[in-house]
Amino acid sequence: MLPPRLTPTISTSGRGILPRFHSCIPGLWNHKAGLAIARGRFAKGENGVENGLRTYTYICMRNASSSSSSSSSSSTRWKSRQGKDWFARAAKVKGLRSRAAFKLLEIDTKYKIFKRGQTVVDLGYAPGSWSQVAYERTQPHGRILGIDIIPAQPPHGVSTIQGNFLSRRVQQSVKNFLLDPERGRPRRPLFSSSPDEEDVDDDVVAEEPSYIDLERHMNDHDNGAAGIQSTSPAPSSSSSSSSSPSLEQKQEQEQEQEQENDETKMVHVVLSDMMMNTTGIKFSDHAGSMDLCNAALRFAFETLKPGGHFVCKFYQGAEDKELELKLRKMFAVVHREKPESSRSESKEAYFVALRRNRYVDAATLGYVNDV
């Protein structure tokens, strides 16, 4: 009996057919080629040449269009899923770069993490839908800085740095960018012809140096900082020989140190939508996700203002409990979220950490050698 939906082709000489399908087992499907060979009698002729006494070659009508159809099947399934996905269609209509924007919109609607004029850092910003949401929710005069290893066109009004965020050098570039509180903000008009006239220049963003320029001038910046430190006066011998500082002096020193630390913390919200390419191996995918989350949290520890917020995507697994414990030490309130716009079959979830505590040191979070 012939397999269903097949068209038989008969050849009385298998010399031209058998070498082509020599790797096939007679009677079994060759799914990769989309072909099958029926059971037949084959014999070795003289000089080892294979001769088919009677060979039937069946071409699968379902797969006969081309072998490339199997390779494009995943793309077809993705397009089909996107076409049926309400959030994907809505993102396209609203001009958002991906459906992920609705996840952040849902989180912000519930927890009110954005305010006007904030500084927001978006880690793993590409393609830019989260940055679009942050830009709209912090206007006017908010500033958004996106970082990603993938080159992507920045969304309107968003500054970006391309680089591997796991590199401490790239993180230092981000900090250098943020030190100037006006850098990356929309320019305000110097003059207005009428007090009732709209600020048409509010959306104009200053041109920023490229990532390469930031890397090039980083050493100069570091050397300059070192020079400033070296010119500071050394303590006099009389003060060093005096008795240990009093309690009031210690409190003053602690206040000065806290003020210096607060000056280096210039970010109101840190977003992390970073995710490594998944392998299908749950342990590996979860471990990679935790590495990115911990890098984002350490950056938040170094740059986030007291009272600031932290939103981080993670791949669920055994180690996320440890990450949650760190978050609870650093923030007043921590929530686990699975937005409705997140696909039910996905293992992703989000930590929403609100109101950073002022008095949290590096040792509490396990950053023994923190710089």
Image: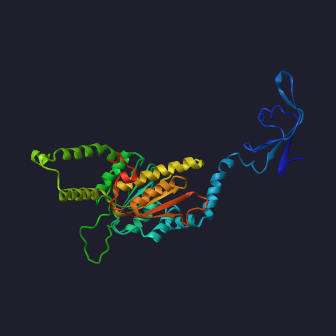
- 134 in relation to 321, above or below: below
Q: Residue furthest bottom?
A: 196
Residue toward you, 232 or 69: 232
The residue at 49%/57% (across/down) is 313
Measuring from the top left, give residue 213's x and y in whole percent.
Answer: 32, 46
Measuring from the top left, give residue 1's x and y in whole percent.
Answer: 90, 47
Q: Residue furthest top?
A: 47
Q: Is residue 190 left or right of residue 312?
A: left
Measuring from the top left, give residue 78's x and y in whole percent.
Answer: 62, 56
Colour scheme in use: rainbow
The residue at 89%/36% (across/down) is 54
Residue toward you, 277 or 204: 277
Task: Name which quarter of the figure residue 249 lies in.
Answer: bottom left
Q: Is residue 64 left or right of residue 364?
A: right
Taking the image as drawn, is residue 276 in sight?
no
Task: Name which quarter of the figure residue 354 lies in.
Answer: bottom left
Measuring from the top left, give residue 96's x and y in whole percent.
Answer: 49, 64
Residue toward you, 361 or 69: 361
Task: Name which quarter of the figure residue 220 lies in.
Answer: top left
Taking the image as drawn, is residue 141 in sight?
yes
Residue toward you, 63 or 219: 219
- 308 in relation to 6, above or below: below
- 45 in relation to 117, above or below: above
